[in-house]
Image: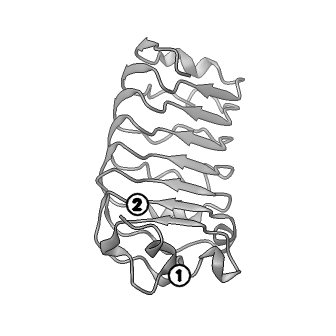
Amino acid sequence: NNNKIQGTISPQIDNLHEAEQIYLGQNQLTGTLPSSIGTNRPNNWRFFSVYNNQLTGPIHEGMRLRKAYTLDFSRNEFYGTIPNDIGQENYSTLRLLYLDHNTLTGTIPSSLMQMRKMKGLFLNDNRLQGMIPYNINDEQKVNMLTIRVQHNQLTQSVAPVICDMDVNRGEYELVELAVDCEICPSDCSLCMRKCY
């Protein structure tokens, strides 16, 4: 982290499958993510961060980082859609997903709202369209603390089921719902507290 390392990420990084934490954040890395990450064998990575580099290209499907608690791809130049395989089946332990400050397009996969252990979803500052999926798993309703989707191109209003997850209502734990003001219903105090 923060070592001013330059160059690209070697495909050999996948050989570090016994490591639990891979911090490559705040460097000057360029190029794309190796397509081999996690594909050679299941690995033990609990934390994987390439935060704040100059990486580009898509975030590819099939990474098989199944033991990860935190994935941080934020503040790069990634483009394309959010991988559809990021969901409960492939990432059952994932708690924090940072995809913010890239140029990701498409819609927010509904699979992200079915992840039982997810606590924080950071998708802000991209070019995402559509809406925040509201087919939320009951267990996720209890665990979710933060949803940040502001500064995108979302057009559909936040669904009442998400507004009802407000920690101040006593049943759930959602403390932050950051959205653009245009999609925040006036009766949703949760996003009215923090709309942009």
Q: Say which residue label 1 marks.
A: 161
As drawn, the label of residue 108 is 2
Find the distance from the CA under tag 1 to the CA under tag 2: 17 Å
Above or below 172: residue 24? above
Residue ID at (37%, 44%): 101
Residue ID at (48%, 18%): 11
Residue ID at (35%, 42%): 102
Q: Based on the displayed image, in which of its 4 quarters is residue 178 positioned?
A: bottom left
> In the figure, is residue 52 to the left or right of 103?
right
Q: Name the outermost residue toward the bottom.
A: 187
Residue type beneath disc 2:
Ile
Q: Nearer the viewer, residue 189 or 35?
A: 189
> In the figure, is residue 90 to the left or right of 147?
right
Q: Position of residue 188 (x, y in %)?
A: 47, 82
> In the figure, is residue 35 to the left or right of 54?
right
Residue type beneath disc 1:
Val
Q: Position of residue 176 (x, y in %)?
A: 55, 64
Element at badge 1? helix
Q: Which of the two labelled residues, at mark 1 and mark 2, occupies the earlier sequence position?
A: 2
Above or below 97: residue 40? above
